[in-house]
Amino acid sequence: MMLFFLLLPPLLMFVASFSRSPWARKLLPVSSFAVLIPVALLFRLPKPYELWGRYLVADDLNTYILLLSSIVGIGVTLALLTLDRHVKISTKALYRFYRFFGLFWVGLSLSILANHMGIYWIGLEMATLSTVYMIKTNRSAAAHKEAWNYMIVGAIAISLILFGIILIYAASKPILGEQAMLFDALLIKAREIPSPFLFEMGFAIAALGMFVKMGFFPMNLWLAHIERASFYPVAALFSGILESGVMAGFFRFSRIAERVNYDHLFFFVFAYTLLTIFIVSFLIFRAKDFMRLFSLSGIEHMALIALFWVSGGSFAALLHFGAHAFLKPALFLSTGVLESTGRYHFAGALRGYAGLRGKLFWFLVGLFMLAIVSIPPSPMFFSELYGFAAMIDDAKSSHHLLAMLGAIALLLALLSVIFYRFVAIYQSMKYEGEAEPKKVYSSEVLALTIFAVGLVALLLPSSTAFLKGIG
């Protein structure tokens, strides 16, 4: 019954998108807001909670991710209410966006809640295909081109994940039989897998597919190009929801790989994420517009989350994960106002706002810009402290302390490049250029306020206790 209530709002959204009556226009955002209600109820139920046998199981980890995603979905819906006042979009295209948003949410929910590798893959593929059509909501040549690019890259990534799942299943089937597709069964029997090399190959290939979908090395720019060509709510969906669904899968697979061979897991993820951050830091330094800047920054943060997670800093990873889920969509949605005059440069972007809504808008956007580079009291400041501490603790136990300290020093140097760039951009936005009048709407300020409240809630003692309990 709970599964029915979880899927009812997005299915209503999908059905209503085919109607052109006035009630449908009102039902679409209402059904989008309604996704939070069953997720909040599920979040409060005792865990683990079986939604569909052992195939869909809610636990503290995936309900936390789903709750964050549903809040981001509400922020995106609030931005959609005024999308046609910032960009040229027809009513038909807006309905089409909601239609595929509903399918996207169904796929994402199945993927996040899946205890079965096959269902995880099907849900992720469904969410991926839905976003292709949401990209094409922008009726421009660039958007159509990038939609095809996303189809190609997404197909490569999802194929790698599928091939990795096949290898993991083959390595585990001798001891688990058909249960080799279940995450919880694999976790229990991980140390008994008769072909650990085959399993590790499967994990590495699946992880590579997940990393490609999040814009990691060597495909760092495709995500930035897509988000630049799309309308800004699509970019918010990518950064705050789709990447969260992909990372949920990485959390599941890496927990199993950790029990098979932790040293191999750590070395693979550490080398991959460090290389990704090295490249992204200099791409950020050269970014010339908001969408690419925020997109590349998102890749950096997802790499840090993966690194903290495999270093034993699950609390740091989940705190950073929650902060990213609120901060990055908030910044993407703010570009609808920052670039509403067609200016894609940074100078003067935080100037020209009048009235209470305008002042609150630039104040929140300025705060988010500084919070994303971990200036205290941002949750990212604390998550990085805990994350680097976890890396040092892990190095102590493996007797590689000096090597780890050197790697952390390199990582901090790269993060300093990003920090310098963001602070310079903030100063340019606030103090340089001419002030041009910009229109801010109540729904947009409300969306940013919701994200700001979510960031504060992450630092509450009850929230930190819950996140520590997940690890």
Image: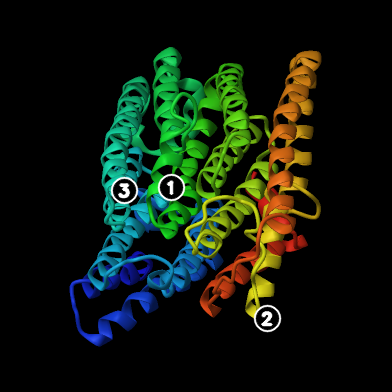
Q: Quadrant of residue 364?
A: bottom right
Q: Residue at x 49, y 30 (%)?
A: 216
Residue 101 in view (yes/no): yes
- For the C terminus, the quadrant is top right
- Residue at (56%, 42%) from the top-left corner? 288
Counting residues from the start of the chain, the first of labels 2 and 3 encountered is: 3
Task: Give the residue number, with chain letter if any, for mark 3.
Answer: 143
- For label 1, count other residues whose C-alpha is less than 10 Å away and answer few (under 14), some (14-19) or many (20+): many
Q: N-terminal of the two: label 2 or label 1?
A: 1
- Ranked by sequence position, the earlier of labels 3 and 1 is 3
* Crowding near the residue tagged with mark 2, few <14, some 14–19, many ≥20 C-alpha atoms within 10 Å: few
Badge 2 marks a residue whose secondary structure is helix
Question: Compared to 134, does 120 lie above or below?
Answer: above
Give 56 or 32, whichever is nearer the viewer. Answer: 32
Q: CA distance from mark 2 to mark 1?
A: 29 Å
Quadrant including the N terminus: bottom left
Amino acid, disc 3: Ala
Please identify the residue farthest to the front as the structure is shown.
434
Q: Amino acid at mark 1?
A: Arg
Visible residue check, residue 34: no
Q: Write down the residue under mark 2.
A: 356
Question: Which type of secondary structure does the marked residue at label 1 adopt?
Answer: helix
- Local packing at callout 3 (Cα closer than 10 Å; few below 14, some 14-19, many 20+) is many
Q: Quadrant of residue 102?
A: bottom left
The residue tagged 1 is 228
Query: Number of marks in the image?
Result: 3
At x 36%, y 59%, the residue is 105
Separation (CA) of disc 2 from disc 3: 35 Å
Residue 190 location (% of width, % of height): 48, 26
C-alpha span from label 3 to label 1: 9 Å
